[in-house]
C-alpha cells in the first residue's frame, strides 16, 4: 500500500442548504458563491428543473473546473421508483422513467449521477432483486455513457431505518463487478452512516469498497436502537452519534495509510442536514471546518 496526503473537498448542497432551496433560482447563485472561495473542488446537487438555471450552473462548473455530482434521489422518491424491484415489468417501467431525467445532469455540466436502490422486499426476493438491480444499472450506465456521465451507487441500510435492498458493502461490490463487465462507468458512493447502520466496521467496509469507490460521505448516525434519534437522520457531527471528530480523524488516517484516498483523488463531503429554522451557512461552515481539519491531519 502507498501513502498519500489529501482528498478532494466536496459540499452536499441539498442537505446543508435544504432550508434555502425552496426557490430553485437561488441555486446558481449559491453554486457560484461556494466555488468563489476556492476550497471546494466538487459540488453535489439535486435535480435542477429550470433550463435557465441548468445553463447558469453549467457555465459556473465549466469556468471554475469543478466536478459536479447530481443526486437523483429526489426523482426516485417523488416517482417511487424501484430500480431493484424483483418484478421485471415494474422495474423496467421505473428505469425508463429514470432515464427521462438524465438530461438534467448533462445540461448542468455534471460528471456523475448518483442513485440508490429500491426497498428491501425480503430475503426470499434477494436473488431476484440483485439480478434486477444489475440489469437496471447496466441500462442506466449505457444511457449515461452517451453523455459522458459516470453512475454512482450509494448503499443505504437494509434493516435499520431506510430499509433499502442495497445494502451491505460486500453485496454492492459484487454488483459493481458484474456491471463493470458490461459497462465501466459505474462506481460506489460510500457513506459512513449507512455502513455503520448495516453493522459494518467503517474502515473494513471502505477497504472492501475502495477499488470501486470515488466518493465518501462523512455521515453521522445514532446506532443505539433505544435512542429516539436511532437511524440515518443526516445529523450534525457531534457526540450524540458514533461519528465524532475524533472518529473522523481515525477513519481518514486509516484511509490515507492504506491508500484508500486514491492518490488524493477521492471526493469527500460531510452529509449534514440543516434544520428548517436555522442558518445553512452556519452548518456549511461546520462541515467545511471538518474537512479542513481532515486535510490538516493528513499533512
Image: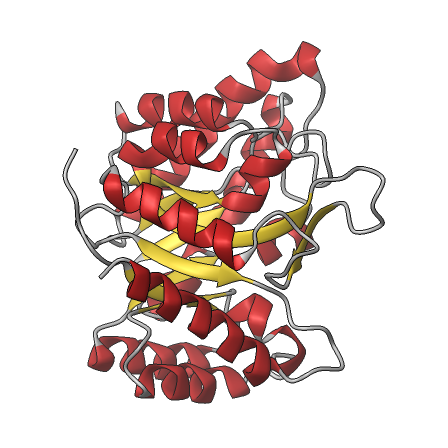
Q: Is residue 270 left or right of residue 126?
A: left
| Vertical relation: 251 (above or below) 137 | below
| Vertical relation: 283 (above or below) 242 | below
Q: Is residue 56 visible?
A: yes
Quadrant (top left/top right/bottom left/bottom right) for the N terminus: top left
167 vs 137, nearest the viewer: 167
Residue at 44% from the left image edge and 78% from the top image edge: 51
Residue at 54% from the left image edge and 29% from the top image edge: 200
| Vertical relation: 171 (above or below) 146 | above
Residue 60 placed where, x, y %? 30, 82
Q: Is residue 156 visible?
A: no
Name, please, the residue furthest toward the left: 2
Q: Quadrant of residue 86?
A: top right
Q: Quadrant of residue 110?
A: bottom left
Residue 271 placed where, x, y %? 54, 60
Q: How is colour applied across the structure in the image? A: secondary structure
| Vertical relation: 98 (above or below) 202 | below
Q: Is residue 160 left or right of residue 137?
A: right
Residue 140 placed where, x, y %? 40, 40
Q: Is residue 119 left or right of residue 298?
A: right
Residue at 61% from the left image edge and 57% from the top image edge: 74
Residue 238 placed where, x, y %? 63, 61
Residue at 49% from the left image edge and 82% from the top image edge: 27
Image mark count: 0
63 vs 49, nearest the viewer: 63
Quadrant (top left/top right/bottom left/bottom right) for the C terminus: bottom left
Amino acid at each position: 500500500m502507498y501513502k498519500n496526503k489529501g482528498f478532494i473537498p466536496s459540499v452536499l448542497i441539498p442537505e446543508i442548504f435544504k432550508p434555502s432551496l425552496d426557490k430553485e433560482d437561488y441555486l446558481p447563485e449559491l453554486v457560484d458563491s461556494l466555488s468563489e472561495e476556492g476550497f471546494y473542488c466538487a459540488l453535489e446537487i439535486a435535480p435542477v428543473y429550470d433550463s435557465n438555471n441548468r445553463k447558469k450552473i453549467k457555465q459556473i462548473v465549466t469556468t471554475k473546473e469543478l466536478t459536479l455530482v447530481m443526486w437523483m434521489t429526489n426523482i426516485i422518491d417523488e416517482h417511487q421508483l424501484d430500480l431493484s424491484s424483483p418484478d421485471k415489468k415494474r422495474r423496467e417501467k421505473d428505469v425508463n422513467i429514470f432515464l427521462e431525467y438524465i438530461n438534467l445532469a448533462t445540461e448542468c455540466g455534471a460528471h456523475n449521477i448518483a442513485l440508490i436502490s429500491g426497498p428491501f422486499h425480503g430475503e426470499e426476493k434477494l436473488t431476484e432483486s440483485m439480478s434486477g438491480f444489475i440489469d437496471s444499472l447496466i441500462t442506466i450506465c449505457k444511457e449515461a455513457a452517451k453523455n459522458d456521465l459516470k453512475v454512482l451507487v450509494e448503499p443505504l441500510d437494509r434493516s435499520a431505518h431506510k430499509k433499502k435492498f442495497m445494502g451491505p458493502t460486500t453485496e454492492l461490490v459484487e454488483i459493481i463487478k458484474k456491471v463493470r463487465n458490461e459497462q465501466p462507468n459505474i462506481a460506489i458512493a460510500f457513506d459512513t452512516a449507512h455502513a455503520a447502520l448495516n453493522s459494518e466496521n467503517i474502515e473494513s467496509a471502505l477497504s472492501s469498497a475502495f477499488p470501486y469507490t470515488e466518493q465518501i460521505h462523512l455521515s453521522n448516525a445514532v446506532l443505539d436502537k433505544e435512542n429516539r434519534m436511532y437511524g440515518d437522520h443526516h445529523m450534525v457531527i457531534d457526540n450524540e452519534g458514533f461519528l465524532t471528530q475524533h472518529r473522523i480523524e481515525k477513519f481518514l488516517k486509516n484511509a490515507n495509510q492504506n491508500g484508500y484516498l486514491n492518490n488524493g483523488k477521492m471526493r469527500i463531503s460531510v452529509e449534514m442536514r440543516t434544520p428548517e429554522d436555522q442558518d445553512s451557512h452556519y452548518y456549511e461552515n461546520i462541515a467545511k471546518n471538518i474537512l479542513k481539519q481532515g486535510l490538516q491531519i493528513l499533512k
